Image: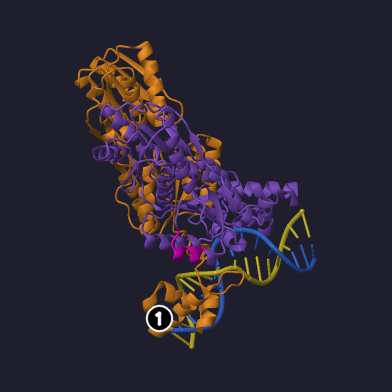
Chain colours: A orange, B purple, C blue, D yellow
Amino acid sequence: MNPSRKPATVQDVARLAGVSAMTVSRALNVPDKVTPDTLRRVREAVDQLGYVPNAMASGLRMSRARMVAALLPTLVGPVFQELVESLAATLGRQGYQLLIGQTGYDAAQEEALVRGVIQRRPDGIVLVGVASSDGVRQALRASKIPVVETWDLTADPVDMVVGFSHVAIGRDVAAFLHARGHRQMAIITADDTRARSRTQAFLTQAQALGAEVVERFLTVAPSTLGEGRRGLATLLQSHPGITGVFCSSDSLALGAAIEAQHRGLKVPQQLAIIGMGDQSFARDAQPPLTTVRLDGTRIGALAAELTMARAEGRAVEQTVVDVGFHLVEREST
Amino acid sequence: MNPSRKPATVQDVARLAGVSAMTVSRALNVPDKVTPDTLRRVREAVDQLGYVPNAMASGLRMSRARMVAALLPTLVGPVFQELVESLAATLGRQGYQLLIGQTGYDAAQEEALVRGVIQRRPDGIVLVGVASSDGVRQALRASKIPVVETWDLTADPVDMVVGFSHVAIGRDVAAFLHARGHRQMAIITADDTRARSRTQAFLTQAQALGAEVVERFLTVAPSTLGEGRRGLATLLQSHPGITGVFCSSDSLALGAAIEAQHRGLKVPQQLAIIGMGDQSFARDAQPPLTTVRLDGTRIGALAAELTMARAEGRAVEQTVVDVGFHLVEREST
DNA sequence: TTGTAGGCGTTATCAT
DNA sequence: ATGATAACGCCTACAA
């Protein structure tokens, strides 16, 4: 291994192997187009010099970064983990890498981030649960980079979409609780765009079915167990007659369950609780939580496949994919 | 905005603004070295063409990717979230971007991943809780890229380290439980390298203090609430006399607490439980969990600062940083 | 099978 | 203050 200052280049390898730079490139990328003997010499030279190809150079030359960017509101919280994990895994298997950007909740910062990402010319941009501002949408469209919006089904996608209907979730959960005999329901929920569609659909459906009282409690940004506890406590204070609560995450639901039990309320006999996400702990909670299963893993894998397909010029048959959701009934309802 | 196929380049902007490519570059990067009038014309041309600089080209030219890579075992689970979030945020503030790689638990895959990352010539590589194999360590050293290992204090760091002592944690927790009068302790823990040092230290210290029985229960890979429940159930079966349990994560601890309560055991009166991580839910659990606070946010920020300092040629005074930990006593002990 | 020439888009350097 | 030239490291196209 050469201990010199700068990393070795194809030229260095070529010199040492007694061939041209092109032959080195070929030996590395299309080994069959090179004599076995040449191949061996090149490989030896590579090992000896500790040569590692420079991805910026090849990316520039080929106009392909072999990299996909994912933009998400936050990495904290269990909501998007499966998605990002599966995105990274699926991409990694094909030799793509994953660039992560946190948009936070600041629109200006989000625009800056998107611009920064576009500068890298990634093969694709995956927006995770992002309600992109107009400036962002425009910048993305202009970039001509394949874009996959996820975690929702927007009416007017930038490019491709993989998600599910939050309206359908709100509607189905209200119907489910009503069918179980609940007439006084409440919702404990985050307050982003998607949460608002869900909540609206939940309210509308509950009313349509004749549920008597519906109360909403909005949590501050992160959906934590603590917010669930406090949310339920607040709700019970003003509406002690509530018998069914829809929580916009399993963390909130677990918190609500803990708070209910702490107050001596039996779940589900006196209070039914339904969560969302089907995190691993939902099944193991006491009681096991009824929840809305969202297949983050599938969404991530699909998003990865779509961007790679586009990057490689393969035709993409379906640019809008509804992966749906699944109401998992356990013992909290 | 030019609707043509390929993105605009400095050349295009230069042509439209009636200046040279160099002037465009200067106008964009060192605006003061350019006439106000020129600046204006360049900016107009940029807007008109929707020009976005190509980071691969500039990275190649300047040998600086303005990118840092983070390698972690998994994105799933609450353990490393704070760290990654703070890493991304700190880097983002200085215009750096974050590349994410999941090493999983497969050494071969990890090596491939590291090689892939090195090809991008990032300004730094942050290893999150990674016990790098020898091949990996060698590849990293040879790359001359600044490396920060985190979440532990290794004896022989590749380069820089920001972490805390797992041995000290194991020791302190055993001492803590002993001081509270516990003589039959157990540990429910994951089984990676760091967990093993912790466990060993816990056992050693407990014995040294004369605790009578110590049982260990190893969970499979992910530290979930369910594992905590099952772990405690198993432990109680063989050793019903246990009065204190150290769990290697708050999720495990919460699971243990739920299981204990489900069996009618009072926490902490009949069973003391201590977790690790001080996740947000630890404070809000019932009872609130005693836990070992780890400052992932600080570790992430420090790791980011160190890599950027190195990348920018600034001197790094301290290459080994022990951020310590903090035993937070709540009501589960 | 292998090599030569040239360019991907940007910026440092050295003129002017 | 601005421009011409060259080079960063790689790979496509063409030639031998």
Residue at image x 51%, y 60%? B120
In the image, the segment drawn in magenta is: B132-140
Predominant SS along the magenta part: helix
Find residue A212 and report its horizontal and vertical position in percent.
27, 12
**Where in the figure is residue A221, as x and y percent of width and height?**
46, 29
Q: Chain of mark 1?
A: A
Query: Which residue in the protein does label 1 denote?
Result: A34
The quadrant holding residue A216 is: top left
Q: Position of residue B263 (x, y in %)?
A: 25, 29
Quarter of the image with the C terminus of chain A in it: top left
The answer to which quarter of the image holds residue A67 is bottom left
Magenta stretch: includes residue A78: no
Given residues A139 and A184, the one toward you in this image is A184
Instruction: Estimate how packed mark 1 is, as few (under 14), some (14 to 19) or many (20 or more) residues with alpha carbons within 10 Å.
Output: some
Name above or below for residue A100 compared with residue A273. Answer: below
Residue at 50% in and 68% down: A53
**Vertical comparison of A318 with A13: above or below:** above
| Res. B333 in view | yes
Q: Examine the structure image and report whether residue B136 is included in the region drawn in magenta.
A: yes
Q: Is residue B31 above or below residue A246?
A: below
Residue B50 visible in the snapshot: no
Residue type, numbered disc 1: Val
- Relative to the observer, which residue lies in front, B267 or A42? B267
